[in-house]
Image (spheres, rainbow, N blue to C red):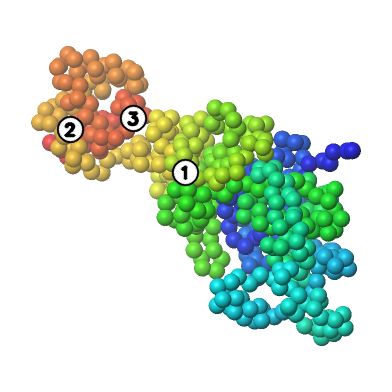
Amino acid sequence: MSVRPIRVRFAPSPTGPLHIGGLRTALFNYLFAKKNGGTFILRIEDTDQSRYVESAEQYISDSLKWCGIQPDEGVGATGNFGPYRQSERKEIYGEFVDRLIATGDAYYAFDTPQELDELRADFEAQKRTFTYDSNMRGKLKNSLTLSKEEVDRMIKEGRNYVIRFKFPEDDVIIMQDLVRGEVRVNSSTLDDKVLFKSDGMPTYHLANVVDDYLMKITHVIRGEEWLPSLPLHVSLYKAFGWTSEMPEFAHLPLILKPDGKGKLSKRDGDKGGFPVFPLQWKDPVSQEISSGYREAGYFPESCLNILAFLGWNPGTEQEFFSLEELVQSFEIEKVGKSGAKFDPDKAKWYNHHYMQVKDNESIANEFQLILKEKGIEADLKLVIKVVAKVKERVNFVSEIWDHADFFFQSPVEFDEKVVKKSWKESSSAILNSLIKLLESETVFESSELETSVKAAIEKNEWGMGAVMNAWRLALVGTSKGPHLFDIAEILGKEETINRMRKAIEVLS
């Protein structure tokens, strides 16, 4: 028996921004495909046109591209199994639903939405739940209770209908899941899901199964929220006679709120001050803007590591992975069943790590964009030096300004609290003496300055704290910043001395 080539798909619906849970699903599909020499496909499931958002499809593609998760086939790529948008495939599905009608695995249902709402209300009044299932379908308006002539007449008259799947009355459906093992469900507990509507559009369930079959999908890796749909999808494969070509299924655990109580939502991100979308999203209707990981300053490498560890464990001590290393290490069997808590602090920790290992020039180029927004034109060499000194203190490029603004603009005012603590009666005299020393320095470099200044402190018995605190205040305007001699070197002799003179003038 030949082994089928591995083919997986990421099949989002373009109804809004891609949640990081969806991005994790895409990542795990990608890793599985690449680990096994397979094909990663992007398919857009847009059968629900009422919820379609035009800009969402491009957003999905841009999010995958930002993370480096590029499809081998599908929307935005080539392929021999297209089209890859379900709305462009709608002529395909009628043939397959007709097969199910012919075999008795599906039936027409003419119940109006109003009639079903009334039934639900009646059941609710009796503290019961209405379900269109094997117990109820024999009492409702469908092709199982109506004559063939009535059914044909109603269709001919243009009456609205749906086509429902007909579950067996009492059958144990046995399913295998690569994450959860064997799953058993009795068909009597399942409702007869709608597969097709009279407007010619299939529902997600029919289109999903038919497309997976036609596109020769071997593994369906998706979120836990689709687990209740598994009995229907498995039953559809059996009804079509495709059991031998049915994909293997793996349902990924939920991404939970930071406190572990429920599924992570946009509201949690808004409340906690962290993104839940990969890129910034502007709602085309409300114009509301939701933050994204890219715009919040996260690197793609950080995002990949954050997502990979939400539900997957490599079983080693390694904490940081390149995309290539994730591919090599990924095994679907190492995905857990339990929900994975999202930790905003851990997310920042990942970004801090990649801030440290990234080369200073690439960070400097990003930081220059922030400087330009502030109206500051800075030489790249200077910015690279600044980045090298302060990046260990920050998690994001945007935070560099808070730690390094004084490199690009002289202090306008001096921190009152620091002045009270650091500026003494002797400070002006000491700094004036220090200016004379600095003016005589021919090599204005950190190590040389440190040797000269410390020798002067010792010789004049000024006291290390008295000199360094006042000098830092003069150069920075407060008590922050890296090694003081490094600050002086980067500022240069002229700027260093000018700032010292200004501080003496203002604070004396």
Q: Residues within 10 Å of mark 2 (few under 14, many from 20)?
A: many
Q: In the displayed structure, does residue 232 sit left or right of residue 491?
A: right
Left-right relation of 194 to 472: right
- Residue 2 visible to an observer of this rendering: yes
Spatial CA distance of label 3 from label 1 is: 29 Å
Q: Which residue is at a point 58% across and 35% down the rendered structure image? A: 313
Place of residue 367 in the rendered image (x, y in percent of width and height, measured from the top left): 46, 41
In the image shown, does 470 or 254 lie closer to the viewer? Answer: 254
Q: Which mark is residue 181?
A: none
Q: Which residue is mark 1?
A: 343
Instruction: Give the SS element for disc 2.
Output: helix
Q: Secondary structure at mark 1?
A: loop
Q: Which amino acid type is shown beneath numbered disc 3?
A: Pro
Q: Secondary structure at mark 3?
A: loop
- Dot in front, 3 or 1: 1
**Is 322 situated above or below 246?**
above
Residue bearing the label numbered 2? 422
Sequence-first tag of 2 and 1: 1
Q: Which residue is mark 3?
A: 482
Are dots 3 and 1 in contact, CB under 8 Å?
no
**Residue placed farthest to the left in the image?**
425
Residue type at numbered disc 1: Asp
Q: Looking at the image, which is closer to me, 78 or 337? A: 337
